[in-house]
Amino acid sequence: MDRTTNGDGKPSELRADVCIVGGGPAGLTLALLLLRSGAEVALIERSASLDREFRGEILQPGGLALLDELGVLEGAVARGGYPLDRFRLQEDGRTLLDIDYRRLPGPHNHMLSIPQRHLLEELLTSCRAYPGFVHLEGHRATALLRSGGTVIGAVARSDAGSSTVHALCVVGADGRYSKVRRLAGIEAGRIEAFDFDVLWLKVPAPGGRRTPAAARLREVGVTRSGGNPVLVYPSWPDSVQIGWTLPHRSYTAAMDEGFAAVRDAIARAVPDYADAVHAELRTMKDLTLLDVFAGSARTWVQDGLVLIGDAAHTHSPLGAQGINLAVQDAALLHPVLVEALRTRDVTSQALGRYEVARRPAIDAVMKFQVMQGRMMLARGGVAARLRPMVARAISRTPIGAKLTRRVAYGSSPVRLRTDLFNPPVLPPAAR
């Protein structure tokens, strides 16, 4: 990789095959796939370290299989994580829906609750083993370079100065509020498809193996008991992640009632963790608001540019699809970029093969999540009255198994193109 450094040793100008903006699951997975296929990759990441707060923590079986095939799952899990066997929907103390992932074929017949940092550390360590990888951490993308309308690179700025990356293709993998998407002039396509937002908090897991709460620490649960529904799942190490839902855009009104009132409402919604909620929630800084909306950019490609992950499409936390979709996006874009590097064709038509193949599956996920939200979280009306009947139908008919597979793997299961690796590698089962 050609590079020019400034006085402090940081590259001020460099050339790579692909410039990726955003070092999350989508960006780092794609970087490793390209590096293993012989490409040179420059990664621009605004955070200077992985010592920061992340929201998405749950991996579905489809994402687990891809990461295992890529060779990073074992190392990520070794850093700490919890397998989750089931999803449970409860209302007023009774179980309406109980989906057991252990009925899926192994070895990835479970979900995984894992700090996103653990996954990113393993991916980043693997990327750094390749001499064709440059990591511009602590850099913000500030401009896209263009020639004749084609994106040919990006400018990144840090506290120490700016760096210019020349590349055949730029990939925006920088999240739901993507700077690359804005610089490209692509509309985010925000859709107010959900009628709830989520206040997230984390509390210590209850002690003792015989407590009701401890017995449910291998599941993701949605609990409804009169107040606002809550999402609950275990979070490494020895913690519980709680997502208290509230009507969309009602956060200010809720806070007008006072912090103590909100804390008491959350505690009532999760009686198993009420003591921990009162002990851990001391100020508003202990809560994180997630503005829940759907979004799909009007296009994911331009000449020399591709958007993936949340930069291209944004989803609800229901169904725990964020990391899953990001990893799948990277796997599907990988062969398209390898071909583009081979032919030097980065027109929107060539790169658009990725969007044409991927968009139907993303649209299906969005429609499914809207139905999930209405069925699980509706506070009244027809959806609330039908919820027990729908839950029984799912639990007692083949519909349940079909929906489980769809949530676990997506409407179109994704596989890695390991035949493009240089040298090719064997899948995990054949090693």
Image (cartoon, helix red, strand yellow):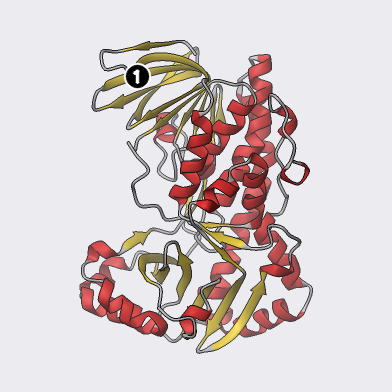
Residue 307: percent from left, percent from top:
53, 35
**Residue 235: in sight, yes or no?**
yes
- Which element carries disc 1, helix, strand or loop? strand
Picture residue at 35% right of the left edge, 24% below the top: 156
Residue 368: percent from left, percent from top:
63, 61
Task: State left or right for residue 77 relative to residue 411.
Answer: left
Query: Which residue has dot 1 on it?
Result: 163
Residue 200 in the image: above or below residue 335: below
Which quarter of the figure is the C terminus placed in?
top right
Residue 326 in the image: above or below residue 181: below
**Residue 298: in sight, yes or no?**
no
Q: Around disc 1, counting alpha carbons within 10 Å, would you say few (fewer than 14), some (14 to 19), or many (20 or more)? A: many
Instruction: State the count of labels.
Output: 1
Q: Amino acid at mark 1?
A: Ser
Picture residue at 65% right of the left edge, 21% below the top: 340
Picture residue at 69% right of the left edge, 22% below the top: 339
Task: State left or right for residue 368 relative to residue 114.
Answer: right
Task: State left or right for residue 76 relative to residue 248.
Answer: right
Residue 198: percent from left, percent from top:
40, 65
